[in-house]
Image (cartoon, rainbow, N blue to C red):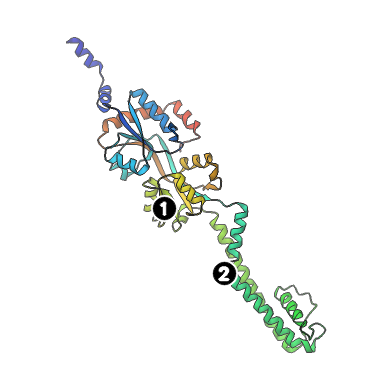
């Protein structure tokens, strides 16, 4: 009897909590999210895989891994179909109504990825912007005016000034040459009007040509400025009217909807979103910065994509559990605190080139 009493005294409340929380094999759900969860065939590695293995080892947890897509995994937590998700889930007020979160183990933010054109592509885009329909209309209007005033000056000058404006049809070229030289304000002086009608034509063309060329130059300069501004984004709000992508049901997705983005394309995986960005189906892809950085650094097919120096939507990552798993959440949270305060945690973050805010 005394032995039983002493045994009961030796069992701490913490051990009783562990025994109450872990009564069976835990169902652990995940979806690939490099560098936190890296799936290569049946092999799993990454920051969260390492963290979970340490927790399971120290607590003596028996578990089985279950691969799921992101949306189904969130539903499974809400319906108590799994025991825990070890994905880097962002703690939000909306999610906290439907699930429990462990203590946060990593702080991050969202960022923006855009397609960066090559040098030759930039040249082609610039040329397409300049030589658009409005520019071509202006250009052909200019040609018409050159011909009109060239023929006009020839008509008045061919009799009084035949040395400079030949009377034959060849004199038309003289008129056109004078018209171009006058419009461009080059003024060679090799041809000049002498008749009253010719001088009137010249006066009108000088002012008209100057105004027309100024307008055309301003139009081209405006197009080039717009192109330059499009290539230098300063805020994620500049994408509000653009087609942008993000992960379905993610914290970034909620943030964009709350920020009144109107054209959001959602994806089940980062790879599909980046593929569409590379293929110009969307203008930008917005998601968690560490996941996007790792993906772009590891996949050479995304070499034309770049991360903009923008940070928004501060996020705290944690594991997610069903609402009725308070005891399990408590013991796992305690272990997360112990591990993330250790030197080995800093070493594993460095191994995957991660740094906390």
Q: Earlier in the sequence, mark 2 or mark 1?
A: 2
**Quarter of image, res 300:** top right
Q: Quadrant of the C terminus?
A: top left
Which residue sits at x=46%, y=52%? 236
Seen in the picture, residue 213 relative to 338 is either above or below; the reply is below
Where disc 1 sits, the SS reads: strand
Question: On the rendered structure, is 131 left or right of 340?
Answer: right
Residue beneath the point at 62% across and 57% down: 123
Q: Residue furthest right?
A: 163
Residue 124 position (above or below residue 33)? below
Q: Name the residue tied to disc 2.
A: 133
Residue found farthest to the front: 41
Q: Nearer the viewer, residue 354 or 342?
A: 354
The residue positioned 49% from the left and 51% from the top of the image is 277
Q: Secondary structure at mark 2?
A: helix
The answer, for residue 112, to whether it is visible in the render is no
Residue 43 at x, y percent in the picture: 44, 31
Q: Which residue is mark 1?
A: 265
Residue 267: image location, x then y, percent: 41, 48
Q: Are marks 2 and 1 in contact (CB under 8 Å)?
A: no
Split into 4 quadrants, where in the image is the N terminus? top left
Q: Is residue 118 left or right of residue 202?
A: left
Residue 82 position (above or below residue 144): above
Neighbourhood count class around disc 1 (C-alpha, 10 Å): few under 14, some 14–19, many 20 upward = some
Instruction: Please state the horizontal and vertical placement of residue 83, each as a whole percent of the image.
Output: 30, 34
């Amino acid at each position: 009897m005394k032995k039983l009493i002493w045994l009961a005294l030796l069992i701490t409340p913490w051990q009783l909590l562990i025994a109450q929380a872990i009564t069976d094999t835990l169902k652990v759900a995940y979806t690939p999210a490099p560098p936190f969860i890296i799936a290569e065939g049946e092999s799993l590695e990454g920051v969260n895989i390492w963290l979970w293995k340490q927790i399971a080892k120290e607590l003596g947890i028996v578990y089985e891994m279950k691969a799921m897509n992101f949306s189904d995994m969130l539903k499974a937590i809400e319906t108590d179909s799994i025991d825990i998700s070890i994905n880097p889930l962002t703690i939000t007020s909306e999610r906290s109504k439907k699930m429990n979160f462990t203590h946060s183990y990593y702080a991050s933010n969202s960022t923006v990825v855009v397609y960066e054109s090559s040098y030759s592509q930039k040249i082609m885009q610039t040329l397409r912007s300049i030589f658009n329909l409005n520019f071509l209309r202006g250009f052909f209007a200019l040609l018409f005016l050159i011909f009109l005033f060239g023929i006009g000056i020839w008509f008045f000058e061919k009799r009084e000034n035949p040395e400079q404006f030949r009377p034959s049809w060849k004199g038309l070229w003289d008129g056109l040459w004078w018209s171009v030289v006058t419009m461009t304000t080059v003024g060679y002086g090799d041809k000049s009007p002498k008749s009253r009608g010719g001088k009137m034509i010249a006066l009108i063309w000088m002012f008209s040509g100057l105004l027309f060329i100024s307008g055309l130059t301003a139009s081209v300069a405006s197009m080039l400025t717009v192109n330059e501004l499009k290539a230098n984004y300063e805020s994620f709000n500049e994408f509000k009217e653009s087609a942008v992508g993000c992960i379905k049901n993610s914290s970034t997705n909620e943030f964009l909807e709350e920020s009144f983005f109107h054209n959001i394309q959602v994806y089940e995986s980062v790879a599909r979103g980046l593929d569409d960005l590379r293929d110009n189906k969307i203008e930008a892809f917005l998601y968690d910065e560490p996941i996007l950085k790792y993906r772009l650094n590891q996949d050479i097919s995304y070499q034309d994509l770049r991360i903009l120096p923008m940070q928004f939507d501060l996020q705290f990552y944690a594991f997610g559990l069903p609402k009725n798993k308070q005891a399990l959440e408590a013991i796992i949270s305690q272990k997360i605190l112990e591990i993330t305060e250790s030197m080995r945690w800093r070493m594993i973050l460095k191994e995957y080139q991660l740094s906390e805010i």
